[in-house]
Image: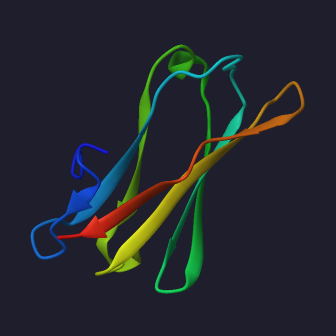
Amino acid sequence: MPEAPDGFYDDEEIFRLTVSIAPYPGMAANDVVTVHWAAFGTLHREPVRIRGPWVGGAFGVRIAKPYLSSSATRVHYEVEYAAGGTAVSEPLMLNDR
């Protein structure tokens, strides 16, 4: 996350966090990558369908400020492969400074 490289962000200075997702094994067009984040005791989700030109490249998913917690935000993503099957990333904990 470019806005929180050390796992910390300043809630008063940022407008969003960007979840940067590197190319993953088996990446293909029409995979659905869903970013999950928990803040304020609520789980939020943002699904993104992979387009052909994106295959093999990194991409970002933005989390808007109203969905960030001033104390802690837990983030992970899940891949639903177009060919079948799923994969889940390790969770990342972010904290306000």
Camera-side residue: 53 or 7?
A: 7
Q: How is the image coloured?
A: rainbow
Q: How many marks?
A: 0
Among all residues in the image, which is located at the extreme right? 84
Residue 85 position in % (x across, y down): 87, 34
Decide if residue 5 is on the left or right side of residue 26: left
Is residue 14 positioned above or below 70 on the image? above
- Answer yes or no: is residue 68 visible: no
Q: Residue at (48%, 64%) from the top-left corner? A: 74
Residue farthest to the top?
A: 56
- 38 relative to 34, above or below: below
Q: Is residue 35 above or below residue 12?
A: above
Name the residue at 46% across, 18% down.
Answer: 57
Question: Is 25 on the left or on the right of 13, as rendered?
Answer: right
- Which of 42 and 81 lies nearest the eye of the viewer? 42
Q: Is residue 50 depicted above or below 73 in this figure?
A: above
Residue 79 occupies quadrant? top right
Q: What is the residue that sits farthest to the bottom in this orientation?
A: 40
Task: Give residue 91's position: percent from left, percent from top.
Answer: 55, 52
- The residue sitting at 66% across, 17% down in the picture is 25
State the residue at coordinates (21%, 66%).
15
Q: Position of residue 94 (x, y in %)?
A: 35, 62
At which x and y percent is residue 82? 81, 29
* Quarter of the image with the C terminus in it: bottom left
Q: Quadrant of the N terminus?
A: top left
Quadrant in which residue 78 is drawn = top right
Q: Observer-nearest residue: 28 or 88?
A: 88
Residue 30 visible to an observer of this rendering: yes
